Amino acid sequence: MSYSKQLNSIKKNIKKQTNALLDLQKSVDQSVVRAVNLLFKSKGKIIITGIGKSGYIGLKLSATLSSTGSPSTYINSSEASHGDLGLIQKNDILIALSKSGETKEMMPIINFVIKNKIKLIAITSNPNSFLAKSATISCLIPKINEACPLNLAPTTSTTMMLVLGDSIAIELMNKRKFNEAHFKKYHPGGMLGHSLLQVKDLMHTKSKIPLINQKKTMREALLKMTSYGFGCVGITNEKNILIGIITDGDLRRNISKNFIDMPISKVMTKKPLSIEPSENIKNAIKMMNDNKITALFVSNKKSKIPQGIIHIHDCIKNQ
């Protein structure tokens, strides 16, 4: 088969999956809303179960729920009867994924939740299946042929399960008002965790902030500036409010015979840029790049009192 025919075949398969999602969008109904509300009100864990390809989708859904504020764990249906049923407690809710709804390996775990009066949410394409009829709420996916040319390998069905599961997780996020601060708590590592860092996480504080009172001499300001290594020194007034900054550029522009004896006010740049401690690191980098500077003082808009200083090297190192 030529490359062009292979490419057309791949595009055809993608289109089949896209069409399946469009059908899912049209068919989704109040059962999904009821499922979300049931999960939101639950005081227990969310247990996901499945087997085969549906099981992998369930495993991913469980991970997504746990990382977005809805504690969840996954049980492989075939392992349930070998001790894993002990994970399911009174207030938990089971979400079972099965296209046919008649998977033999799933029967023991379904019977267990029925016997123990545990809520069951089914995601299946068969409304007349044992799973659907046993469920507290049954969320149906459309009956569509698999993208597999044999109509055997789970493809379109698992894609629909994945998107429906993610949609439930996202709606739970909305109802729980799950924000960036929560996300950061559960994702401290990797690029995702770094992208959620705030200025206050990296800023230098207290005695490490290069500050000097406006009444001091340029000689003292220069010593302060060179000893801290930020390439700048902040100028404060009697109320400790940041009123100016002296940078390497200010020194070059004002260098003269009597430079050391000049008043600080004659050298400093007034109303320096600053950033709030709650700002994202990416915003700090952008501000420094846009203004061609390498450091920012950190303060609240209201107080104007420096709480810290952040250098572009600190930001880049942690991105």
Image (cartoon, rainbow, N blue to C red):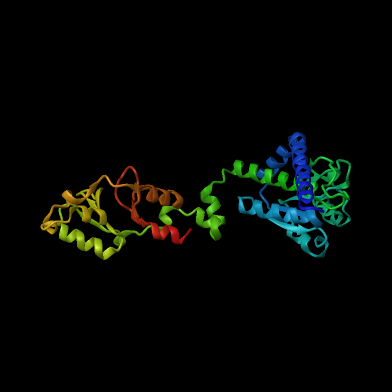
Quarter of the rendering occupied by the N terminus: bottom right
Q: Is residue 69 above or below residue 209?
A: above
Location of residue 68 in the rendering, given as x and y in whole percent from the top left corner: 61, 50
Location of residue 115 in the rendering, given as x and y in whole percent from the top left corner: 83, 52
For the image, the number of numbered tags is 0
Location of residue 134 in the rendering, given as x and y in whole percent from the top left corner: 84, 45
> In percent of the image, x 73 and y 57: which residue is there?
74
> In percent of the image, x 19 and y 54: which residue is there?
213
Q: Nearer the viewer, residue 113 or 289?
A: 289
Location of residue 167 in the rendering, given as x and y in whole percent from the top left corner: 68, 43
Left or right position of 45 against 258: right
Q: Work out whether residue 110 can be spotted.
A: yes
> In percent of the image, x 82 and y 55: which residue is there?
109
> In percent of the image, x 89 and y 55: which residue is there?
104
Q: Nearer the viewer, residue 242 or 136?
A: 242
Left or right position of 2 against 293: right
Q: Is residue 211 above or below residue 176?
A: below
Q: Nearer the viewer, residue 102 or 109?
A: 102
Q: Work out whether residue 50 can be spotted.
A: no
